Image: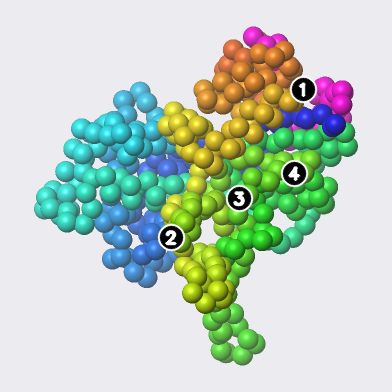
Amino acid sequence: MRPNISILVGSGFSIPEGIPGVRELNKRLSKIGESEILIHTDQRAMFLNGREDPNRHSGWDNRIFLQEFLEFYSAEVLKPSEEFHYKAFYDFYSGYLTNKENKEAIEGFYKRFNDKHFKGSDNHRDCYNRVSDFNRSFNQLLASQLHKTKYFEDISTLYYPPYDPFIGFLRELLKTSDIKFHTLNHDLFFDWLGQHHSDLWQYYADGYQLEGSPFYGTVSYDFNDGTERKVHKTYYVKLEHFVDKFDKSLALYKLHGSVFNTIIYTPQPDQQRVRLKSNYAVSGFLMEIKDPVTSELKFENLWDEVAPDFLSGTTNKTRFYTGDPYYEILFKHFENNLSTSELLIVIGYGFQDSGVNEYLENNFLLRGKHMVVIDPCKPKTELIEKYKATYIPKGVTQMTYQEYLERVPIELKP
């Protein structure tokens, strides 16, 4: 049997790729003017980025609430010495949605918002629903900062500087070991590398499968037929669905979800909550089912949760580790992978997630196994010294291929 090697990466892994880190996200999300964004009638929010919104009246109240709720938090909740942190902010308002935490402050703001914009009587949305709408839009705006259009292009790549030394290191590991690659990031960078890099794609699995999927997305497209006339087409694309299949040598586990994971609900009476991997320009979702009367196949429109499925916050997210069936599966894999691995490589993770740290300690470090931490800034955690981990003060792209081979102990017994 081939030995297992576990890898755990955080935001520092994707920063050299141009994916914004926490500091950049805090700056972008701390203040959002209503004129900067669009909220579609289908409840999808996005930054305009200089484009025009042809229907500014639609969704104006949601845009204004989003702007003023952020202003309220910065002006009245944060202390003068505190700076905005989007994860702490998420804990603040999501606590209200789950168990009415911060009720007095949030409902006080809601009342003032109503008095200002609706003369005290908002007949459309109560406080809970306003904050719920905000949460959906805020997550969509956050998600928009964490992906690039190229990740949806059907292309392959052989060279990808400055990550080539790391990719070469993975290729070397795969000769003798199975890699359990765990990420806390929501972005699509490693998903894209795993599926499209010519040295990795044949080893890659992420728990999702296209073959046999009954789920489809609707794509609308306008193209020019070579004349003055534009042709409008609407067609369906099959979508990958989660089947818990990690059956290859390079298995990716996105422990905190993904900006393009979507939750849909299958039709009654056997309704199920299913995770799909969305695709470029997909809007409505459908399921191919057998008609109970005629036994013929047909498409059934599905309801989806609109907001991308990922975990955020500092403490709130940990309740999903054992409280949501999907994340329970992923964290059970995390636990098993750690316990069966002889080496753990941590890259760009600051050890700020107490829940994740507990998994590391209980299922790996306490068993006397070796951890290597690669990060240009030494994480503030006692785990490195306590368990005599190897600390390498470099970033993922700052190490040469030879340094990976020399400084990371990969001589493992099968």
Residue 118 visible? The answer is: yes
Mark 1 highlights which residue? 342
Residue in the foreground of this view, choosing between 199 and 290: 290
Q: Which quadrant is home to the N terminus?
A: top right
Percent of width and height locating residue 405: 85, 28
Q: CA distance from mark 1 to mark 3?
A: 28 Å
Q: Is residue 273 left or right of residue 83?
A: right
Residue in the foreground of this view, choosing between 366 and 163: 366
Sequence-first disc among 4 and 1: 4
Sequence-first disc among 2 and 1: 2
Q: Residue at x 73, y 21 (%)?
A: 372
Q: In this figure, what is the number of numbered marks?
A: 4
Please, is residue 250 above or below residue 41 in the view?
Answer: above
Q: Residue at x 68, y 46 (%)?
A: 245
Q: Which mark is residue 268?
A: 2
Q: Is the C-beta separation of discs 2 and 1 under 8 Å?
A: no
Mark 4 highlights which residue? 247
Q: Is residue 21 left or right of residue 61?
A: right
SS for dot 1: strand
- What kind of residue is marked 4? Asp
Q: Quadrant of residue 45?
A: bottom left
